[in-house]
Image (cartoon, coloured by chain):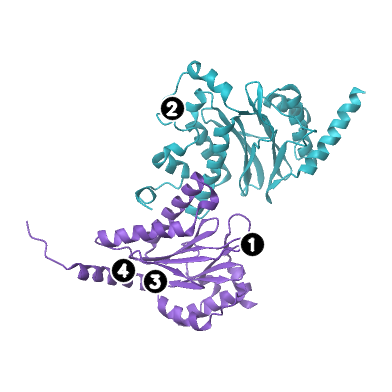
Chain colours: A cyan, B purple
C-alpha cells in the first residue's frame, strides 16, 4: 500500500482517485479519453457505431411511493442483435438506481464505477451522499465521457433516486455535455425513448398506485419496441421480458419476472382482441 | 556545518518504539471478538461522531487506536486500496490478508525511515463466509503483524484487557449478547469505571447479512443486548 493510497490526496471521490492515479481504468479509456483530445465525429463515428453493441429504450415513471425504472433487454450491433438478455437497469445503492442507453460496454462500466463511487464516498465520509449530490456526480462522469461520445461511444444515463430528506422519488436526465435536468413526472431515453414518452404522455397521472405505474412503464416499453428496431419487446418464445425496479423508501426492489409476465399477458391479450 | 552526533541504531529504534507506545497507551481500548455469527468490535469511545471502527469492504472492517489523524489516514488508504482492487478485479478478490500486508509494509517503512513513527495500532478484521474461518490481524506501529485467534485488543491498557478476556473467554461460539457483555465488562474492569451504552462504539461483521456485512449498533441496540 504505497504512495497513491496515502499521498496528499484529499478527495472522497473514487472517480477523482482513478482519474489522478489510474486513468487507464476509467470507462473507455485508452482511446482518446486519456489525451483528452476530441476526435472529429466524421473521422471515427461510422466505424465505432457499427462495431459496438448499443443498448436502447429505458424509462422512469414517478408514482405515489417513489419511482419505477425499467428497460428493455436488447443490444444491437448495426443491424444485428448482439444480446437478447442484456440488463440496463442497475441498483446503485439502497436509495438509487440508474438505467443506461448508448454503447453497452462503457455504459456498464459507468454503472459499476458509479456504484463504487457512492459506496466509496459513504465509507470515507461516514454518511451517504444526498440524492442531489449523487445526481450531480453522475453528471460530472457523463461530462468526462464527452471525448468518447465524439467517437460514437455514447453513454447516456437516466437516474432515479429516493430522496430520504424530501420523502419522494426523483428522476434526473442528462445531456452529452454533462448537463443535468430534473424531470417532474416521467422520462425515457434511447432510440425508442420518443415512442415511450408518447405513451407516457397520454396515460400518465400524478400519484398513481404501484400496479398502474408498472403497467404504464411496461406498456410504454412495448410500444417503443413496436416502433423502434433497436428496442426489444417481450420475447415469448425464450421467456425474456423487460426488467424493472421500484425505487422507494423501502429501498430498491426488483420487480419479479412473474409480475412482469402477468402484465404482458394481459396487454398482449388486449391487443390481440383488437385484431380479431 | 555542525556534525550530526552519532546515535546507535538500537538506541534510535528503542526511543522511537517507546515514543509510539506511550502515545498509543494514552488512548482507550478496542476489542475485536468472534461470536456465533461473525465478529464483534467494541470500543470505549465517548464520541458519537468520531469513529474508531469503520467499514472497509464487504467482509472487512478496520479499527484504529492511538492518534486519530494518523489512523484516520490509514483507514482512508485502506478503503482506497480495497475499492480499487474490487473495481479492477472482483469484489471477492478483496481480502483482509492483502490489506493487512499493505498496512504492515507502510507502517514498517515509516517506522524505520521517518523521524517520528506513527502512534497507532490497528486491527483488520474479516468475517468468514461459506464455512471459512474469521481473520483478525493486529498491526503495530512498527509494522509487526499478528494473526489473532478468538479475540484481539488494541489501544489503552491493551495487555490488561487481554488478560481479563483470556480467563473468561469460552472456546464455544458465544451469542452476540454474551460476547458484548464480556467485552464491556473487560473494558470496565481496566478503565475502573462504569461504561454507559452512550460511551461505547459497537459494530458487527455479521455473516448472515447479504452483500455488505458491516453494521453499527445503535445505543438502543446495545442497551437492549446488554439487558437481555
- What residue would you read off at disc 1? B208
State which chain disc 1 sits on: B
Please name which of the two marks, 2 or 3, marks the residue nearer to the observer: 2
- Towards the viewer: A82 or A259: A82
Secondary structure type for disc 1? loop
Please name which of the two marks, 1 or 4, marks the residue nearer to the observer: 1
Q: Does A29 sit above or below residue A47?
A: below
Task: Report the residue at 30% width, 59% height from top.
Answer: B110
Work out how far the residue at label 4 is from the one at label 3, CA to CA, in angstroms: 12 Å
Residue A258: percent from left, percent from top: 80, 43
- What residue would you read off at disc 2? A32
Residue A128 seen in the figure: no
Numbered mark located on residue B20 in the image = 4
Please name which of the two marks, 2 or 4, marks the residue nearer to the observer: 2
Mark 4 or 3, nearer chain start: 4
- What residue would you read off at disc 3? B27
Task: Report the residue at 43% width, 27% height from top.
Answer: A32
Amino acid at each position: 500500500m504505497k504512495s497513491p493510497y496515502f499521498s496528499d490526496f484529499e478527495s472522497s471521490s473514487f472517480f477523482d482517485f482513478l482519474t489522478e492515479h489510474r486513468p487507464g481504468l476509467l470507462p473507455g479509456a485508452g482511446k482518446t479519453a486519456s489525451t483528452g483530445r476530441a476526435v472529429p465525429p466524421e473521422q471515427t463515428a461510422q466505424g465505432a457505431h457499427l462495431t459496438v453493441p448499443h443498448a436502447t429504450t429505458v424509462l422512469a415513471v414517478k408514482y405515489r411511493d417513489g419511482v419505477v425504472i425499467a428497460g428493455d433487454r436488447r443490444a444491437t450491433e448495426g443491424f444485428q442483435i448482439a444480446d437478447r438478455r442484456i440488463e440496463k437497469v442497475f441498483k446503485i445503492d439502497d436509495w438509487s438506481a440508474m438505467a443506461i442507453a448508448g454503447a453497452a460496454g462503457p455504459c456498464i462500466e459507468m454503472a459499476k464505477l458509479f456504484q463504487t463511487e457512492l459506496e466509496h464516498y459513504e465509507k470515507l465520509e461516514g454518511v451517504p451522499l444526498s440524492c442531489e449530490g449523487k445526481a450531480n456526480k453522475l453528471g460530472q462522469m457523463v461530462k468526462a465521457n464527452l471525448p468518447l461520445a465524439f467517437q460514437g461511444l455514447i453513454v447516456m444515463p437516466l437516474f432515479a433516486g429516493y430522496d430520504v430528506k424530501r420523502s419522494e422519488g426523483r428522476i434526473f436526465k442528462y445531456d452529452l455535455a454533462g448537463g443535468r435536468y430534473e424531470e417532474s413526472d416521467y422520462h425515457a431515453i434511447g432510440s425508442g425513448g420518443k415512442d415511450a414518452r408518447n405513451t407516457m404522455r397520454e396515460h400518465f397521472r400524478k400519484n398513481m398506485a404501484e400496479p398502474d405505474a408498472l403497467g404504464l412503464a411496461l406498456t410504454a416499453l412495448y410500444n417503443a419496441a413496436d416502433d423502434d428496431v433497436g428496442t426489444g419487446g417481450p420475447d415469448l418464445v425464450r421467456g425474456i421480458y423487460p426488467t424493472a425496479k421500484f425505487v422507494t423508501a423501502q429501498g430498491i426492489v426488483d420487480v419479479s419476472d412473474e409480475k412482469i409476465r402477468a402484465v404482458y399477458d394481459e396487454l398482449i391479450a388486449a391487443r390481440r382482441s383488437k385484431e380479431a | 556545518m555542525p556534525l550530526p552526533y552519532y546515535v546507535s541504531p538500537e538506541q534510535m529504534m528503542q526511543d522511537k518504539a517507546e515514543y509510539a507506545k506511550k502515545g498509543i497507551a494514552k488512548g482507550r481500548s478496542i476489542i475485536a471478538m468472534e461470536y456465533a455469527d461473525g465478529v464483534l468490535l467494541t470500543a470505549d469511545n465517548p464520541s458519537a461522531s468520531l469513529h474508531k471502527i469503520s467499514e472497509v469492504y464487504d467482509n472487512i472492517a478496520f479499527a484504529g487506536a492511538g492518534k486519530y489523524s494518523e489512523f484516520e489516514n490509514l483507514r482512508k488508504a485502506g478503503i482506497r486500496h480495497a475499492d480499487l482492487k474490487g473495481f479492477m478485479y472482483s469484489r471477492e478478490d478483496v481480502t483482509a490478508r492483502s490489506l493487512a500486508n499493505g498496512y504492515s509494509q507502510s507502517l514498517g517503512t515509516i517506522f524505520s525511515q521517518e523521524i517520528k513513527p506513527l502512534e497507532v495500532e490497528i486491527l483488520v478484521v474479516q468475517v468468514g463466509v461459506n464455512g471459512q474461518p474469521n481473520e483478525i490481524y493486529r498491526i503495530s506501529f512498527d509494522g509487526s503483524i499478528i494473526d489473532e485467534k478468538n479475540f484481539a485488543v488494541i489501544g489503552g491498557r491493551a495487555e490488561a484487557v487481554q488478560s481479563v478476556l483470556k480467563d473468561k473467554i469460552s472456546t464455544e461460539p458465544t451469542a452476540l449478547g454474551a460476547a458484548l457483555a464480556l467485552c464491556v465488562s473487560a473494558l470496565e474492569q481496566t478503565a475502573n469505571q462504569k461504561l454507559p451504552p452512550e460511551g461505547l462504539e459497537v459494530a458487527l461483521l455479521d455473516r448472515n447479512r447479504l452483500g455488505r456485512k458491516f453494521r453499527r449498533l445503535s445505543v438502543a441496540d446495545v442497551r437492549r443486548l446488554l439487558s437481555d
